[in-house]
Image (cartoon, rainbow, N blue to C red):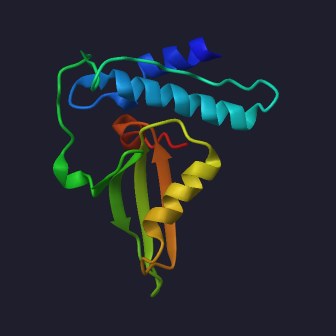
Amino acid sequence: MYTSFVCDALTSHCLIRKGNKSLEAINEAIFHFAEVSNKKNRHNFQQSIFRSSIGGTIFFDVEEYNPYKVAKIYEEADNYLIYNIEPIHHAGAKRLSVKVILRFQCSMEQIAEIAEAHHKGHAANIVWCYFGYDEDDMVDCNYI
């Protein structure tokens, strides 16, 4: 399973920042994948250990850097991006449609925590949240 997590982290486009993928981000993704897997499969528990003596991290150039259009990103956090917030009000009820790009594979409980943490205290009757792992998911409506 650990080898599968390493392969998933190395091939994940969600970890790319400014055209680079860092060793630290790869390691965090592996730990996150293991955590999600351990919650689903309690009988097959995996405990990842990463040791290094370097200060800082190593960056790998993986693609040409084309930044997101800043006008479309409403908020950027470590685990997600708020890609789009669209008002869809109807008959006096304040309704919002929110598209969120997740940086890591998440369990449904973690997705619910992200949705609740961001929208708690906002004045809206209904908030529909659509989650995906990259901009293509948002554009193609390929949601989780």
Task: Indicate left or right for 63 with 11 as reference.
Answer: left
Q: Position of residue 121 (x, y in %)?
A: 45, 77
**Which residue of the protein is positioned furthest toward the right in this rendering?**
43
Residue at 42% over, 50% down: 100
Q: Position of residue 88 (x, y in %)?
A: 41, 71
Residue at 36% over, 42% down: 139
Seen from the viewer's position, the closer of residues 13 and 78 is 78
Is 96 rendered above or below residue 23? Answer: below
- Image quadrant where residue 96 sits: bottom left
On the rendered image, what quadrant is the C terminus found in?
Answer: top right
Is 14 rendered above or below residue 75? Answer: above
Residue at 54% over, 34% down: 32
Q: Could one spot residue 13 in this view of the protein?
A: no
Is 9 rendered above or below residue 128? Answer: above
Q: Position of residue 20 (x, y in %)?
A: 25, 23
**Which residue of the protein is positioned furthest toward the bottom in this rendering?**
92
Q: Position of residue 53 (x, y in %)?
A: 36, 17
Residue at 26% over, 31% down: 17
Is 109 rendered above or below residue 120? Answer: above
- Image quadrant where residue 102 sits: top left
